[in-house]
Amino acid sequence: MSAKENQVVDHDYAASAVPQSARSGFMTMFMIMLGFTFFSASMWTGQQLAKGLDMGGFISALVIGGIILGAYTGALGYIGAESGLSLDLLAQRAFGTKGSYLPSAMISFTQAGWFGVGLAMFAIPVAKTLLGGSEMAIYALVVLAGVCMTGTAYFGIKSLTWISYIAVPCVAILGSIAMIMAINQGGGTLASQFAKESGSLTALTGAGLVVGSFVSGGTATPNFTRFAKDGASGLITTVVAFFIGNSLMFCFGAISYIYVGGNDIFEVMTNLGLFWMAVLVLGLNIWTTNDNALYSTGLGLANITGFGKKPMVLFSGALGTVLAVWMYNNFCGFLSMLNATLPPVGIILVLGYMMHKEDYAIGASPKLATVNWGAVVGVIAGAVFANTVQFGVASINAMVIAAICYIIGDKLK
């Protein structure tokens, strides 16, 4: 057998740009990105919005937050598709070869954390309803879900595609049916129900919650849009998917709270007597996001350690499974705080591409710095500023500070 025949092809292109021959069509990319945004924790945000806003404020928060999140993720989606590079390879150009370890570690840490939290979000309510809520039942479901989700993430982008094609229609259709049933069984109009507890939030504060709910995951957008045919496809699928997917999750959470009680679609469906449908929707919802999160974690750890993506997926999946319940009980607040640390990474990746496009052309071999200190300082300063200054939208504050630091550093360099 020749050396060429013996060569193992990396279908996930962890260390190189995705060639045009491996790119996917519009619908495939749309389903992957839509599945990515089906995130159960966003339903919690929907509950918070319903508690603090009237219906007009709720819609305004969705629109304003959706525009900000769409612009951020859309820009990342575009450069991922145009360059064919993952977040970590983009970071090597913007942060330097060693400097890229910082964004890789940040995205790996947060996405692995949310993977573990997602496992517990599935196991705890299902075990309580079906198996009496014993610790043994919870841990057994965590392990079962962890093995299944790690297994599909291990096989890479093709598995993510198939899971998305199955999960997205199921979650969208069944979730919408349950939401309509809840409204029909409840009393009063949507506007009157929203008005009962409104007043504690402003539309701008609500928009900040919308952005913060998925800005950390959104930073990993290039990991998936690099498989799009071109930049326009990457941009459009990302913006539309983020706006539709996030809005659905917020509506599921808000309407479940104001009509039925609880903060997610699982509780709504269970209260409506649709337990097995609830298990299916919750499981598939979490599966799509968890697979994407673990996939990004594997790519990030591969950049740091030099090991392959697949063993890093197995390692982080096992770790997230073991720590899932602990992270669910102790870590959600910390992970939410970290949401403000990742937008600086994204804006620096976008600026790096805009200011040095020649370094991102497919086939280009630019001379990379070891550490770009303007980028590193920008991330740290942006994160500190966002978590200490209490005005505006934290993620936007972080991006502004990071952009200033990066541009100054680039000009000095």
Image: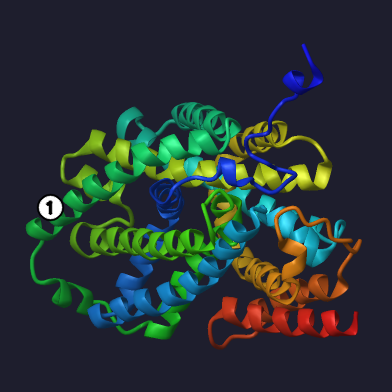
- Front residue of 239 and 384: 239
| Label 1: element kind | helix
Three-letter code, disc 1: Met
- Residue 202 lies, in percent from the top left, at 38, 85
Please report the residue visible at 18 percent of the width from the left and 61 percent of the height from the top: 259
- Front residue of 237 and 304: 237
In screen coordinates, is 131 left or right of 275?
Answer: right
Residue 40 appears in the rendering:
no
Question: Residue 348 occupies which quadrant of the picture?
Answer: bottom right
- Front residue of 210 and 327: 210
- Residue 290 lies, in percent from the top left, at 51, 43
The residue under label 1 is 181
Please report the residue visible at 31 percent of the width from the left and 60 percent of the height from the top: 248
Q: Quadrant of the C terminus?
A: bottom right
In screen coordinates, is 312 left or right of 266?
Answer: right
**Number of marks drawn:** 1
Question: Residue 375 occupies which quadrant of the picture?
Answer: bottom right
| Residue at the bottom extreme of this rendering | 391
- Residue 232 lies, in percent from the top left, at 49, 64
- Front residue of 298 and 97: 97
Above or below: residue 11 compared with residue 335: above
Question: Residue 13 occupies which quadrant of the picture?
Answer: top right
Q: Quadrant of the N terminus?
A: top right
